[in-house]
């Protein structure tokens, strides 16, 4: 199949950047979207140009590294998949595809389609963990966890940290990401002792990183490749209100 | 080059594996009782470099920081959470015996040794089995959401190569959940100031001072800056070398560079010929393909594997003239059920993979490329109903359909084996220290625990055992004799190593040839897959050893790397990795040529059971099964780098078996 690509090119973080046009000719229908870009890049290299830079690694939908906005939608309009799982058979011969990075102020562009998502690491470092020293853990079966709580915690823990939620949100809010982390840990008995501290720290770091506020548009839920429910945002709001109230009283 | 496969030029010295004295079950306890300690006030004076942030590196960096050491941790990805440990699906083994089904540390130890075809070091494997239970405790305390039963306690399932249910799992994403646990522990230590994290940073060389590993040279993958990092010791947890085959189930960025740089600086590479080929992967569909996708081998519980009996029928399927369901029952060959009636479709990974290759070599392959066999669920669907099959394998069927475009509920899946894991790696002793003092190697990057074949659900166990429990106990034995901070980046060795790194980058950029990095990688991968893949022969390996230097020459004359070294340049990154894969492939083929036996993932066609063997006549095993030669080859091959283009020098570590009796693996 033959396609026209409109790709965001930006040499470095402070470059202005612009959309460039490329022909993608003779692309096999069985190829994945990223393999299509590999083919285009191999031709760019042979012609003496600078290949299109994009992030990718596992190419099976779990590492969270790939991060393209395809025709205006992070990871493409197909539900519940990452960029690397998009296949060319979903497009038609002659299509024009717009390929852009995940855009958000808190995700500065590194080059072309690569963005810096270390803000997510800093949020996790602020409180997205259970403070347990190696070697100090009790026997794994000493604390039973009701299956429904374990399953709900798991649903939130499935987040792959790709940042599509932020890229899809008109406010570039990270509430789905932060809500997922808080829900994963706050639902477990092991996470209970630090629940308030964790919740406050996560939200404050999120604000400090420059992510916007949530206005309940649920674009995040629609694009999330791990299909995290926006319920985690409600849960985060509830946990935050309670923690903030307790903090105020304690002061 | 004429190479007769003999071990001429090899050293017969025995490597000191530093195995503690005493009976096997007591070694680790006694070791810990007598291990050296560093007092808390002194620990913070020591700096430790950890390269890699997967299960092994992430857990090591977090735990060492908790103990008080100052840690610098490096990864090439944009976040430590993305390491390829994340892709493991099935589970993690632990000898908890929560099922009361007779499991024990000894049984886990024995299964792992047998699964490895008696080519691993007993003392290490026993220690692994011992600490396995602590891993589960630690992960649960961190909030890893393992599968649970309605009573609130942990669930288990069974896995290949074991008769007990000892595998803990988190849906089909156990690796991901364990890695997030280790990542969160790592970030916790980052926030406390014990770990400095360097994402998007690649190690380009190891720096040795007075024979000890004391630092690394890195490149910042965003700015292109070359940096020196000094420490009191270096830990590599950089994963396996499966991408030497170009196509594998590894992530695109997985590479052997860090390990190979260490090898060039004197660290021995052990058993590189042991590679695991996983039987249930989605077949290659074309030249453009960048990686292969694995589907959990749990599919083999209900799927039946077959190929058409006649090559003519297979040809018609390949051409699209016939479909799987058009083939009558009597024209199908359920070859695993035929050859291994008692294990059937659940035969171990190496055996299943080789059988698929045999069917395809006979012209009976079914995918368009001729390299594929059917994995058929129609009987299971008829017996159990589509809903039951959906509940068991729904996510895998969904994944298959997304990639192949076929609906496995209606038409059989097509599968073919793919490179998945590498058992070989840098040689380490019981302390996980390489022959280069101060250099420690963890996880898939070392060679120690899986012998010639790894059992399912054991990679996660080993990575976390090494990082959480082994290295924190063994590292002080080295550090206690070191003066903290004695080496700085001002040392002349750093200057020299940095100059060499810069020179190599400039050389790569100055070639300005006509061929892309990927084209060389693909060429190398096809060669080693063909000659050093599922089946190897002396002639094939000799041919590969003649071809690899040609590829290397072509690469260094004709590779084209656009751009410069300032800032992001992914082609430059790939070029450095592929250059090392080319050199590494040579060591791998030398090892495969030297090892004149078949064991686990290493199958030499010359060494297989024939109808003249007693074991075949007695019905214990089949013709064509792997034949070990324990008298001659019960040793670890540890290869020393002898200079560019030179044949590496073989060192041997004799394997001594005190706990188990060597036997022929039989899965009939």
Image: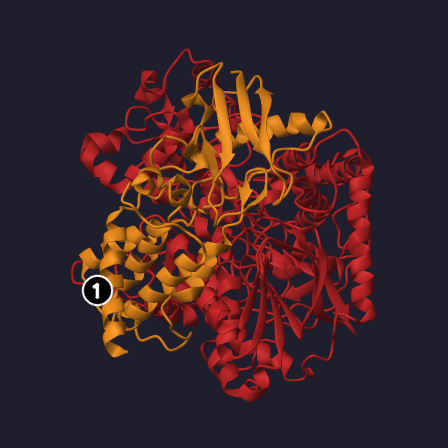
Q: Locate residue B637, reporting x and y percent.
A: 66, 59
- Nearest the viewer among B298 and B197 is B197
Quarter occupied by the C terminus of chain B: top left
The chain drawn in red is: B
Choose top left, top right, bottom left or bottom right for residue A45.
top right
Subunit that carries the residue with mark 1: A
- When the figure is inspected, residue B302 is found, relative to residue B139, above or below; the finding is above
Asked whether, in this view, residue B332 is left or right of residue B48, the answer is left
Q: Residue at x 46, y 65 (%)?
A: B187
Asked whether, in this view, residue B541 is left or right of residue B58, the answer is right
Asked whether, in this view, residue B510 is left or right of residue B116, the answer is right
Query: What residue occupies the far left of the structure in this picture?
Result: B151
Residue B660 visible? The answer is no
- When the figure is inspected, residue B500 is found, relative to residue A4, above or below; the finding is below
Asked whether, in this view, residue B664 is left or right of residue B76, the answer is left
Q: Locate residue B389, reporting x and y percent.
A: 24, 37
The residue beneath circle 1 is A145
Q: Residues within 10 Å of mark 1 (few under 14, many from 20)?
A: many
The chain drawn in orange is: A
Q: Residue at x 42, y 74 (%)?
A: A134
- Nearest the viewer among B665 and B419 is B419
- When the figure is inspected, residue B417 is found, relative to residue B51, above or below; the finding is above
- When the figure is inspected, residue A18 is found, relative to residue B569, above or below; the finding is above
Q: Residue at x 75, y 34 (%)?
A: B560
Q: Locate residue B342, reporting x and y percent.
A: 34, 44
Query: What residue occupies the far top of the structure in this picture?
Result: B321
Quarter occupied by the N terminus of chain B: top right
Colour scheme used in the picture?
Answer: by chain
Label 1: which secondary element: loop
Choose top left, top right, bottom left or bottom right for residue B152.
bottom left
Q: Residue at x 75, y 39 (%)?
A: B548
Residue B179 visible? The answer is yes
């Amino acid at each position: 199949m033959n396609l026209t690509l409109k790709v965001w090119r930006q040499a470095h973080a402070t470059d202005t950047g612009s959309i460039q046009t490329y022909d993608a000719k003779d692309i096999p229908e069985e190829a994945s979207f990223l393999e299509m870009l590999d083919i285009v890049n191999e031709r760019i290299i042979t012609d003496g140009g600078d290949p299109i830079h994009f992030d990718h690694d596992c190419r099976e939908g779990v590492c969270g590294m790939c991060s393209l906005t395809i025709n205006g939608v992070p990871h493409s309009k197909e539900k519940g998949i990452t960029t690397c799982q998009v296949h060319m058979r979903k497009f038609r011969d002659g299509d024009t595809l717009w390929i852009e990075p995940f855009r958000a102020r808190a995700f500065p562009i590194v080059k072309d389609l690569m963005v810096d998502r270390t803000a997510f690491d800093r949020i996790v470092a602020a409180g997205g963990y259970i403070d347990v020293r190696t070697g100090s853990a009790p026997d794994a079966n000493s604390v039973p966890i009701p299956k429904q709580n374990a399953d709900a915690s798991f649903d939130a823990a499935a987040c792959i940290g790709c940042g599509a939620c932020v890229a899809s949100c008109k406010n570039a809010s990270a509430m789905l990401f932060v809500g997922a982390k808080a829900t994963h840990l706050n639902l477990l008995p092991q996470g209970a002792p630090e629940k308030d501290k964790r919740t406050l720290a996560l939200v404050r770091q999120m604000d400090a990183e420059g992510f916007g506020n949530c206005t309940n548009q649920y674009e995040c839920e629609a694009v999330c490749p791990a299909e995290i429910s926006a319920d985690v945002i409600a849960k985060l709001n509830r946990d935050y209100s309670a923690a903030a109230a307790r903090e105020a009283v304690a002061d | 080059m004429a190479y007769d496969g003999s071990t001429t030029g090899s050293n017969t010295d025995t490597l000191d594996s530093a195995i503690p004295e005493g009976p096997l079950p007591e070694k680790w306890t006694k070791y810990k009782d007598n291990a050296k300690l560093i007092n808390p006030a002194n620990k913070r004076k020591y700096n430790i470099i950890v390269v890699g942030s997967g299960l092994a590196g992430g857990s090591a960096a977090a735990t060492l920081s908790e103990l008080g050491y100052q840690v610098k941790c490096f990864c090439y990805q944009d976040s430590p959470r993305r390491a390829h440990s994340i892709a493991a699906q099935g589970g993690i083994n632990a000898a908890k015996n929560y099922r009361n089904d007779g499991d024990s540390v000894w049984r886990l130890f024995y299964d792992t040794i047998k699964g490895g075809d008696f080519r691993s070091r007993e003392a290490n494997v026993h220690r692994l089995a011992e600490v396995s239970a602590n891993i589960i405790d630690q992960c649960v305390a961190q909030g890893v959401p393992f599968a649970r039963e309605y009573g609130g306690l942990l669930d288990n399932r069974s896995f290949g190569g074991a008769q007990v249910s000892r595998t803990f799992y988190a849906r089909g994403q156990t690796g991901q959940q364990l890695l997030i646990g280790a990542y969160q522990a790592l970030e916790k230590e980052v926030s406390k100031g014990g770990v400095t994290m360097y994402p998007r940073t690649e190690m380009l060389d190891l720096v040795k001072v007075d024979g000890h590993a004391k630092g690394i040279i890195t490149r910042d993958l965003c700015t292109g800056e070359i940096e020196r990092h000094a420490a009191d010791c270096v830990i590599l947890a950089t994963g396996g070398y499966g991408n030497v085959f170009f196509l594998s189930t590894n992530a695109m960025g997985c590479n052997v560079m860090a390990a190979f740089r260490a090898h060039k600086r004197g660290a021995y590479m052990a058993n590189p010929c042991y590679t695991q080929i996983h039987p249930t992967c989605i077949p290659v569909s074309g030249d453009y393909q960048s990686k292969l996708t694995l589907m959990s081998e749990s599919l083999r519980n209900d799927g039946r594997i077959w190929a058409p009996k006649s090559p003519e029928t297979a040809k018609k399927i390949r051409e699209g003239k016939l479909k799987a369901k058009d083939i009558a029952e009597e024209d199908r060959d359920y070859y695993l059920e035929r050859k291994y009636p008692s294990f059937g479709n659940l035969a171990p990974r190496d055996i299943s993979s080789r059988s698929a290759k045999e069917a395809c070599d006979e012209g009976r392959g079914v995918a368009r490329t001729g390299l594929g066999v059917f994995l058929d669920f129609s009987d299971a669907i008829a017996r159990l109903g589509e809903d039951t099959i959906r509940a068991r394998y729904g996510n895998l069927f969904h994944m298959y359909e997304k990639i192949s475009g076929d609906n496995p509920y209606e038409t059989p899946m097509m599968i073919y084996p793919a490179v998945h894991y590498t058992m070989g790696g840098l040689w380490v002793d019981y302390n996980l220290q390489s022959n280069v003092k101060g250099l420690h190697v963890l996880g898939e990057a070392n060679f120690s625990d899986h012998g010639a074949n790894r059992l399912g659900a054991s990679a996660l166990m080993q990575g976390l055992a090494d990082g959480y429990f082994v290295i924190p106990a063994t590292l002080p034995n080295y550090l206690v004799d070191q003066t903290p901070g004695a080496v700085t980046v001002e040392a002349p060795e750093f200057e020299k190593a940095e100059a060499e790194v810069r020179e190599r980058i400039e050389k790569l950029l100055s070639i300005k040839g006509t061929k892309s990095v990927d084209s060389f990688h693909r060429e190398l991968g096809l060669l080693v897959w063909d000659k050093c893949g599922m089946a190897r022969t002396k002639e094939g390996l000799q041919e590969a050893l003649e071809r690899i230097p040609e590829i290397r020459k072509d690469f260094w004359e004709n590779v084209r790397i656009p751009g410069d070294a300032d800032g992001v340049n992914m082609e430059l990154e790939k070029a450095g990795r592929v250059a090392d894969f080319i050199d590494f492939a040579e060591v791998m083929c030398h090892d495969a040529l030297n090892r004149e036996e078949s064991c686990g993932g290493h199958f030499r066609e010359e060494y297989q059971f024939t109808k003249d063997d007693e074991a075949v006549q007695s019905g214990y095993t089949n013709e064509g099964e792997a034949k070990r030669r324990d008298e001659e080859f019960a040793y670890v091959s540890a290869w020393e780098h002898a200079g560019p283009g030179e044949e590496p020098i073989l060192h041997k570590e004799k394997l001594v078996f005190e706990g188990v009796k060597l036997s022929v693996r039989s899965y009939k």
